Structures are given as C-alpha cells and as structure tokens.
Amino acid sequence: MEKRPIAYFDLETYKDFFLCKFLFKETRQFRSFMMYPGKPLDILGIEQVLISHCIIGFNSQGYDCPILALALSGASNQQLKDANDMIITRGMKYWDFYDTYNVGFRFKLDHIDIMEVLPGVRIGLKTYGGIAHAPTIQDLPIDPSSSINMLQRVQLDKYCGNDLLLTEICHDVAIEKEWIPLREHISDEIGIDVRSKSDAQIAEAITKAKLGWTPNKRVVPHKYQFTYRMPGCVQFKTEQLREVQRIVASSPFIVLDKDEDTDELDPDGNKVKSGIRMHADIKKIRVTIGNSVYKFGSGGLHSQEHGVVYETNDDYEICDDDVGSFYPKIIITQCLYPEQCGPRELEIYTGTYDERMAAKHAGRKKEANSKKIVLNGKFGKLGSKYSFFYAPELLMQVTISGQLYLLMLIEALELNGISVVSANTDGIVTRTPRGLADRRRAIMKEWERQTGMNLETTYYRGIYMRDVNNYVAITMDGEVKRKGVFTKPEIGSGPSASKAPHREICSDAVIAYLKDRTPVEQTVYRCHDIRKFLTVKNVKGGAVRYMHVGTDLEPFEPNQTAEDLGKVVRWAYRRDYDGAIHYRTNGNQVQDSKGAWPVMTLPDRMPEWLDYEYYVKHAYAMLAEMGIR
C-alpha cells in the first residue's frame, strides 16, 4: 500500500450526539464531523478522508472502526449508542460486530491501531499520555448516558481533540522506537499487514503464513495436571540442589481456568485465577548458596538480597553475565513445539533464530529486531488459551529449565570460591576475587557447553541494590543501568513494559550521587524541568481533590466540595500542604498522595509552590534503602 498522509481519528458516541474527529498530521488541522438532531452526518466527507489518508487510532480496531462503519451505513444516534454499549458494556468483539450489524467499509482502509503496538497489557490512552508527559490529561467530561446540549458538544469536541493529540504522541513514540517501522518491514517481507498487531500476534501471523495452514486452538481442561521433564544436562553436585531437582521433577503443575469454576478458592483462600498453579513444594523452595538465597517462581529465579552494595576494587571485580536469547535457546535446544502445530513449527522457529543471529552479526538491525519480535512473541503466547501456540507444559518447561540452568552455574561458581551476589530470570552478578577471573571464565565456558546457552558479560564499577528487581549499576565506562524504581519513566520501559513517572528527580539525584558524588540537594534544586517532579497514577473508579469552598489548601473534612480529576491523575508535591488525593468511590486516600497537588496540565514554568525539600528527603531515603548511609 502506497504511503498516504496521516490522519489521527477518534469518536464520541452519545444517544443524541455522534462525533468523528480527525487530526491531519501534516497540516496540524482538526476536522470534526458531527451528527445530532437536525444535523445529518457528512458521510461522503468522512469517506473522502478515509480513502485519501492512513488513519491511526487507539483501540480503533476494536471500537472506532466498527462504530464508524455502522455510522457510514446511515445509522441513527440511538442506533450508534446501542451499538456502542454492545462493545463497551457487553464486550462484543469487532469480528462479531461486523457480522451482527452486517456492515463494513466499501473500500480497503489504510489503518493502524497503535494500542497493540505499544508495549504493555491493555494500558489506556490517558496512562500512555501521562507516561509520555502529554501537555494535558483529561478524562471524559460528560457521563456516557447523558443527553448532550449545544455547549456540551463544544466541550466534547475539545476533549476529543486532546485525545487525538495523545494518540499522535503515542504514534510518535512508536515511530521513534521503531515499533511501527519494524512492523512495516515485516508486512513487506511476508505480504501480510501486521502494523496493528502485538509482538505475539505477529508471531502467530508469520507462523500461519509459513505453515500454510492455521493450527487448531488447544483446549486444556480445568485442573489438568502435568509434570516437568528434567533435561539430561541438568546435573548438580550438592545434595541440597539434588533435592531441589527431585522436588521439581516430581511435583505436578495444575492448569486453572476461572471460567470453569468461579467459586473455587486456592490454597491461600483467594479466588482461583486462570493460569498455572505451581505446586506448594516448589513454591516453598529456598536455596541457600554462599551468602545468597534463591527463590523459585513461575517467571524465573530470584535472589533475595536487600540493601547491598558491591564495588570493583583491588581485590574483587563485579561482573554481570546475562544469557543471550535465553528462552528461545531453551525452546530450540530442547526441541519444544506445541503438539497442535507439529514439528514444522520448530523448524520455522529455529530458522528465524538463525536468521536473527546472522542479521545481528552483520549489523542489519531492523531485520534482527523483526526476528526478535517473532521469537519472543511465541513464548508470550504459550500461556494463552486463546492462541494456537497454547501449551502450558512448554511454558513451564522453559521457565523452570531457565531456573535450574542458572542454579547449575551458581553452584559451580560458589564451589570454586566465586560469589554470586544476585540472580534474576536470565542472568547473574558475580563478585570474583582477582586471582580467580580465569577460573570464572572457564566455569562459564563449560556451562555454555553443557546447556547450549551463551553468556554476555558486562563489567561493573559498582552495583547498588535496594533488592534484586530495583538497583543501579555503573559500568567501567561510566554507563548507568537502571532497574525497577530507578528506570526512567517512558513508554516501553520497566517490568510491565511501560513505567509511569514517579518522582524521577529522586532517582536522578541518587544516580548522580552514586556516579559522581554530586550532592542530592544540588541535583534537585538545580532541576528546572517540572516533568522530573511528577507522579502519574491510575486511580480505579476515579480520583477527586476535596476542598472547602473558597480555599484550596485545607485537609479533607466531611461535606467538602470536590474537584473531579479522572481515572489517571498527575501530581507534584506542594510545600506547606497537608491535603491529598482521594478515591471518588470511597473517599480513601490514594497511596503516596499526601501533599500532592494535581498537575493535569503542564505549567509553562516551574511552580513557586513546589516542595523541593520533599524530593531531597525521598532521595536520601532511597539511598538508605540501598544500604548507603
């Protein structure tokens, strides 16, 4: 499909008002198409935009496109509102919508839905806007069940325009991080449009195309049990780890489906959640090796350290060894493929891995990254009952193997006088005496030979850990690696693939101190970027700021008026302010919001009321949690 100019689009649907609004990227102009009593919808005008532009929306595949198709068929406001409720309140899928309402577009849309492209699971547009520091975050200003008057039409038109600006911001991020260009590259390569698909959906599409047929989705009954198959390469020297091996091999895993038995409780008394239940004997495993304790988990091995500092000096060197393509390599070396897909699927997967490695070594970054999407996407679908990749046995085979492999390496190093100070999913950090560096490398080479894995080493000047998931590491070249709470807030970072802003200036102050011994106060007070001081938080049910009539600065008391802030709130901490942000539903205080002042629209300059001292104190508290006094 030839390149067309971009138009962002969004809809607002009420029982007596419909709005389809476009933002044209090249001209920076908005265009609104409205329908309300006495004003018909300009169907030809909308179609002209759709035919001549690449239209980009957020959740547009599941909502905007089907509703717009119905609107273009001549549906009334009430018919559109009823159809809107079928999607929003009853969860109707778009493919069922088109069949039920017998509608579609009379031409092929050039369309991208960026919701699946952006990393993270079902994160809302307002949240992404907060993460990306959008100028304004605004929730829907009028209840969806309302009747809309003339002034409210203007209000909704402005609100919709702001959502289009948020969509543009998200699209720009997807371009900058090459998530869209990579999908365009894959689409050209395989002849299938994957621009609106997640990584896992792309893996499915490519596999189907290369297989030449679509595997059936597997049905696994509720409470289905299986055991882990121990690989021959897993061998331990100590009795402690041999006992761990025995427990893992003999303890069953149980597949649970909450849709099958909603009244059942798990062993802890909680309602059953869909997924794989790990046997209690495995969950209880705590392996003590050297000075570290390791815990098994469905997502990977985790050491249990807290508040520790390790620095390279004349006696020790600190190294981080990550396993490259850990899970894909386990899949390939153990010949793992879903039964419903057959062995041909593994051939395709192995070929993709080989192609990625060749492209990576040749410096063909775009090709290498597109193959990586496919490799990681398959693993991501092994636990989804909605995917033809679904194979809960393989999911646990991969993650448990990864943990046992790392324990083999940890055991070998510790038995040879080399301390492993941290382990997390796909890598370890070692503290090696200067005279044992060659021995460490030899042990790792032997481990690579046994398991078929490959290690990638980074040497650290120091690593400063609050815990295994939250730390700062500084390489010998002065580069900084951030993990967990220290990660820079941006779309595409953090454990959940997107990290919301939360007092970023405090992390910056901690890192500046650790790296260059810059005083915390200097970093905080010299910063003139309000975005560094912000917190963005999702508040279930919506948030409010309570206030007395005529004043803004008094703490909560009953019968106060309230400023409605919406479900995504952005704030900074205000000097000499004892108020907080509260849940709209029950009045409870939102976590960490004591002293928080809403900043739903970014100011042009630093506010005079900003409580710098609050951020200084919090930065010192973060250092203390890392064991630095």
Image (spheres, grey):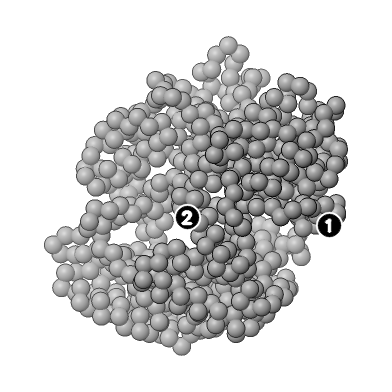
**Residue sitting at x 46%, y 25%:** 603
Q: Specify whether 261 is left or right of 435.
A: right
Quadrant placement of the C terminus:
top left
Residue 172, position as x, y percentages in the image:
50, 45
Who is closer to the viewer here, 431 or 150?
A: 150
Query: Helix, strand, or loop for circle 1?
Result: helix
Marks 2/1: CA–CA distance = 35 Å
**Residue sitting at x 60%, y 61%:** 194
38 over 319 or under it: above or below: above
Residue 560, position as x, y percentages in the image:
63, 19
**Residue sitting at x 54%, y 45%:** 170
Q: Which residue is mark 1?
A: 99
**Residue sitting at x 65%, y 41%:** 9
- Residue 419 occupies which quadrant of the picture? bottom left
Report crowding for label 2: few under 14, some 14 to 19, many 20 or more residues within 10 A (C-alpha): some
Q: Which residue is mark 2?
A: 178
Quadrant placement of the N terminus:
bottom right
Q: Specify whether 581 is left or right of 262.
A: left
